[in-house]
Image (cartoon, rainbow, N blue to C red):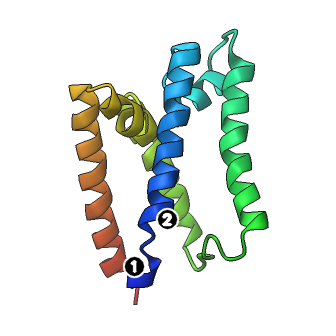
Amino acid sequence: MFDVFDFTPLTASAGGALIGAAAALLWIGTGRIAGISGHLHGVVRRRTDDRMRRGMFLVGIVGGAVLIALFSANAVPERTNFPTPLLIAGGVLVGMGTRLGSGCTSGHGVCGIGRGSTRSIAATLVFFICGVVTAVITRHLFTG
């Protein structure tokens, strides 16, 4: 259940500003959008000159999360008891959705909306609505 003390507008705003600044710096420095699915696709499937940069981008995202988990006590509450088949199915559906939507929430939601892309605004609305519906259904069907 949501606890009013879990609401941290200052740290959330600082995190959002850092994400926006990083996305802007990547755009200015390389002309590339900071979309996670596009970077992953570039590392795994494409034969491009910038595989190393794409890989380092992904390592930085995962590495940052690992550092926060290691050095900040209880920064992220541990979540357990998720059925593995549902996690796998969710991962597959998210992967299919990012392919169908030509990008993920980071590409469309952070970068696309920031650039004023109507396609990204529409995609982000669809992501958000589907996420809310999925969360409500999952919470009521798969929890006690």
Q: Residue at x 70, y 22 (%)?
A: 53
Q: Work out whether residue 3 can be spotted.
A: no
The residue under label 1 is 142
Q: Is residue 42 left or right of residue 63?
A: left
In the rendered view, tell whether residue 115 sits above or below residue 129.
Answer: above
Front-lying residue, 37 or 16: 16
Q: Is residue 1 left or right of residue 19?
A: left
In the rendered view, tell whether residue 124 sits above or below residue 137.
Answer: above
Q: Position of residue 6 (x, y in %)?
A: 46, 78
Q: Residue at x 46, y 49 (%)?
A: 16
Front-lying residue, 132 or 91: 132
Q: Amino acid at mark 2?
A: Leu
Residue 86's disc is 2
Mark sitting earlier along the chain (2/1)? 2
Q: Amino acid at mark 1?
A: Phe
**SS at mark 2 in the image:** helix
Distance (Cα) linking label 2 and label 1: 10 Å
For the C terminus, the quadrant is bottom left
